[in-house]
Image (tube, coloured by chain):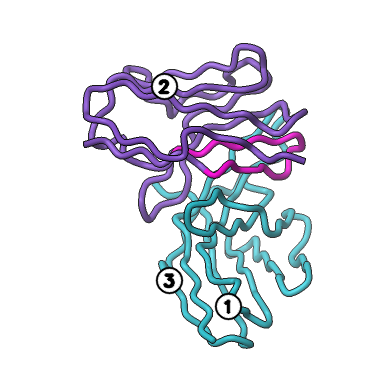
Chain colours: A cyan, B purple
């Protein structure tokens, strides 16, 4: 049973436009969410995160929105640049655990930004 | 600051052979993770260490996989014997805080 879902395997957008990547989760214990970006032959790199006490977090061109009632989050990239072309992973965890935590990853969405 | 180091980067072996992967986490990071990533999927946790203690190995196929982190720093992951289905990218990650983790470049394993 997939606890973190990214239903769009791929997405193509024009340079300068908005990219919206979606993620859904099923486990109500998750209270912290992260987005990672992965280029070919490299490990995932942390992009942005959001705690369940917030519904929006912004960092430059990247904004993550969280809808707890819908168990849904999205990553907005504005404006999109060709260098943003990568696979984006949504991950979730519970930081309320007393000792350590595990991260559960979605299957990823491949973003292609066309010049 | 050096990132998470993994070696080898690529490994091709025949089925039934043993293979080992090595990971050196970021200095000061107490928590170390080994993940397996199959093609088209996200990373899946195999084992998590807090210092030298394996605190979650519930997803590690213990009949053929083993891991160690003897001094609470670097770690090795071993498969013996390897099967065709073990072909994947094996990622190591480390963290100090509870909030994010840093990944190495991974070892791409191909079992023939």
Q: Position of residue A51 (x, y in %)?
A: 74, 54
According to the picture, the residue beneath numbered tag 3 turns out to be A10
Left or right for A112, reference A81: left
- Determine contact: label 1, label 2, CB under 8 Å: no
x, y percent for residue B61: 36, 24
For the residues bearing labels 3 and 2, Cβ distance under 8 angstroms: no
> Which chain is mark 1 on?
A
Left or right: B66 in relation to A98 = left
Q: Residue at x 53, y 79 (%)?
A: A113
For disc 2, the neighbor class at 10 Å (few under 14, some 14 to 19, many from 20) is some
Foreground residue, A19 or A93?
Answer: A19
Secondary structure at badge 1 equals helix
| Residue extent of the magenta highlight | B90-105
- Tell me residue A48's x, y (percent): 70, 59
Labels 3, 2: one chain: no
Disc 1 marks which residue? A82
Quarter of the figure with residue B79:
top left
The mark that comes first in sequence, 3 or 1, is 3
Q: Which residue is mark 2?
A: B78
Residue for point 47% across, 80% down: A12
> Rounded to the nearest whole Å, what is the CA distance between mark 3 and mark 2?
33 Å
């Amino acid at each position: 049973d997939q606890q973190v879902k990214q239903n769009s395997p791929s997405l193509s957008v024009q340079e300068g436009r908005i990219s919206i990547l979606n993620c859904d989760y099923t486990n109500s214990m998750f209270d912290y969410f992260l987005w990672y970006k992965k280029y070919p032959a490299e490990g995932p790199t942390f992009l942005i995160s959001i705690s369940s006490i917030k519904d929006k977090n912004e960092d430059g061109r990247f904004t993550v929105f969280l809808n707890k009632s819908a168990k849904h989050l999205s990553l907005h990239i504005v404006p999109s640049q060709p260098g943003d072309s990568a696979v984006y992973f949504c991950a979730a965890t519970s930081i309320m655990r007393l000792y350590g935590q595990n991260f559960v990853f979605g299957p990823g969405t491949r973003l292609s930004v066309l010049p | 600051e050096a990132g998470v180091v993994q070696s080898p980067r690529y490994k091709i072996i025949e089925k039934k052979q043993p293979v080992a992967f090595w990971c050196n986490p970021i200095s000061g990071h107490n928590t170390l993770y080994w993940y397996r990533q199959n093609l088209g999927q996200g990373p899946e946790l195999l084992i998590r260490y807090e210092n030298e203690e394996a605190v979650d190995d519930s997803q590690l196929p213990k009949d053929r996989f083993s891991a160690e982190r003897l001094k609470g720093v670097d770690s090795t992951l071993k498969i013996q014997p390897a099967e065709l289905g073990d072909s994947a990218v094996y990622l190591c990650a480390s963290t100090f805080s509870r909030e994010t983790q840093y990944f190495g470049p991974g070892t791409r394993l191909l079992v023939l």
